[in-house]
Image (cartoon, rainbow, N blue to C red):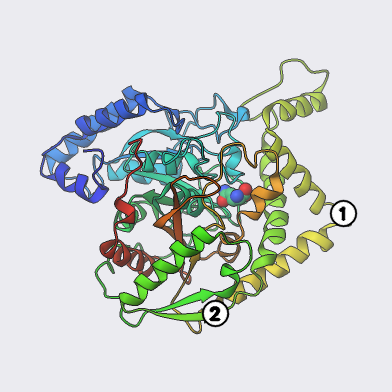
Amino acid sequence: MYTKTIKQLSALLQARDISASELASLYLARIKQSDLNAYIDVNEELTLQQAKAADDRLASGTATALTGIPIAHKDIFVTRGWRSTAGSKMLENYVSPFDATVVARFNSAGTVTLGKVNCDEFAMGSSNENSYFGAVKNPWDKTAIPGGSSGGSAAAVAGRLAPGATATDTGGSIRQPAAMCGVTGIKPTYGRVSRFGMIAFASSLDQGGPMARTAEDCGLLLNAMTGFDERDSTSIDRPTEDFTRDLGKPLAGLRIGVPREYFGEGLAADVEQAVRAALKEYEKLGATLVDISLPKTELSIPVYYVIAPAEASSNLSRFDGVRYGHRAKDYKDLADMYCKTRAEGFGDEVKRRILVGAYVLSHGYYDAYYLQAQKIRRLIAQDFQNAFQSCDVIMGPVAPTVAWDLGAKADDPVANYLADIFTLSTSLAGLPGMSIPCGFGQGDKNGKRPVGLQIIGNYFDEARLLNVAHQFQLATDWHQRAPDSV
Ligand code: GLN
């Protein structure tokens, strides 16, 4: 049963071939046995309560396509009942009095929460090793990172510990872990998914989205996640859409832009081979490849690592020992309490970003760094608009390498930052981007580590992206492969 997709589970639930309670129990048992460290907080009683309510709803005929579907929530979305830690000691025992809009939307669709999944602290990272709750293991190879920051979401889906999960992407955190764990993920257009109750990292970049094994399942989850929310000032006021509406459209005539800059130096041979084979498959499906250029790609790293820390330093000022979470035990006065609380509560990467952020926003440096970065951000967005003159979607690798070994880059923040090269510019531009499994590489070892194909679309083109991914998944079986450990 745990190998079934959300779409298949939905049919079984509606036909009453399995109950939501049975399904939830089955997953809870798998989670208990797992050694991946994907889950931070599990609450069986609450899960089974939700499952029971879903069963009542299924019996009464008021079910939605997602009623009774078990899902995991990235521990960056606040939840009533489960702890909401953002992977930080600062919020180790924090229980939110309200649900994030995303969580509330899923609850009203009738999904069953399996628990909260691990992530890098405040979503800062590319390997999930920055979590206060420890690293997550990649189900394909337990000596490898799962990617980050949504490493728990990706590992849970790949390890069949949930058929779907929520995640967030600020600079690649949905696409990169999805790629490294061999699952499907989509970061929607900025503003599609409410940020209300999504613990903030960099507000102008943060965007929630789903992970699942197939594009079709991602579409079903996205249907529940999106929609205008007046409690998020950057929520986009557009009518709700059925993101699965285009599934089934043939790809004949589709123009795929292939950015030169995504295939240059630094791209590992095993990743390039898998991505090029996927592009060939698209040609067989009737698409044509168009050579394009995104000339500012390289600048996305310095630009992102100015803007994201700037916003983070401001967002994280709220963790002061007064309002939420951790407070130091011994202190002399108020200032000392702030200092000790923050010194104890935050991990190294978070502190590094607060320092960088405060620096680039400070008087005298603001124009040189922050303002300059904002200007280049605009040019990066313009690069994409120029490219979309000659293509409908853009494809390339998600990351320059497959998952690296746990610990291999743990002491080298810059090496981690460089691994974001192909995902940051999409985030800076606010565009939707997907990752789908397209093969395997070996990394440095004789391993078997998944490769992801990135598909980038223009604003609000999620329905097309999902179909472009879906057609590939109808023609290939990469997304159906399961790790040996499952
Ligand atoms: N790896 C990037 C960072 O560390 C992106 C993280 C994210 O998207 N949340 O900031």
Q: Classify the position of the C terminus by image quarter.
A: top left
Which of marks 2 and 1 precedes in the sequence?
2
Q: CA distance from mark 1 to mark 2?
A: 39 Å
Where residue 388 appears, x then y in whole percent?
Answer: 50, 79
Instruction: Give the residue drawn at x 32%, y 44%.
Output: 482
Relative vertical location of residue 348 with respect to residue 421 in this rendering, above or below: above
Q: Looking at the image, can residue 246 be seen?
A: yes
Tag 1 near tag 2, CB within 8 Å: no
Where residue 170 appears, x then y in whole percent?
Answer: 57, 53
Q: Disc 1 vs disc 2: which is toward the camera?
A: 2
**Which circle marks residue 292 in the picture?**
2
Instruction: Give the residue drawn at x 54%, y 24%.
Output: 93
Relative vertical location of residue 28 with respect to residue 456 in this rendering, above or below: above
Relative vertical location of residue 20 with respect to residue 308 in this rendering, above or below: above
Q: Secondary structure at mark 1?
A: loop
Query: What is the total number of numbered labels drawn onto the structure image?
Result: 2
Q: Amino acid at mark 2?
A: Ile
The residue to which callout 1 is attached is: 363
Instruction: Give the residue drawn at x 55%, y 78%.
Output: 385
Where residue 87 appears, x then y in whole percent?
Answer: 56, 34
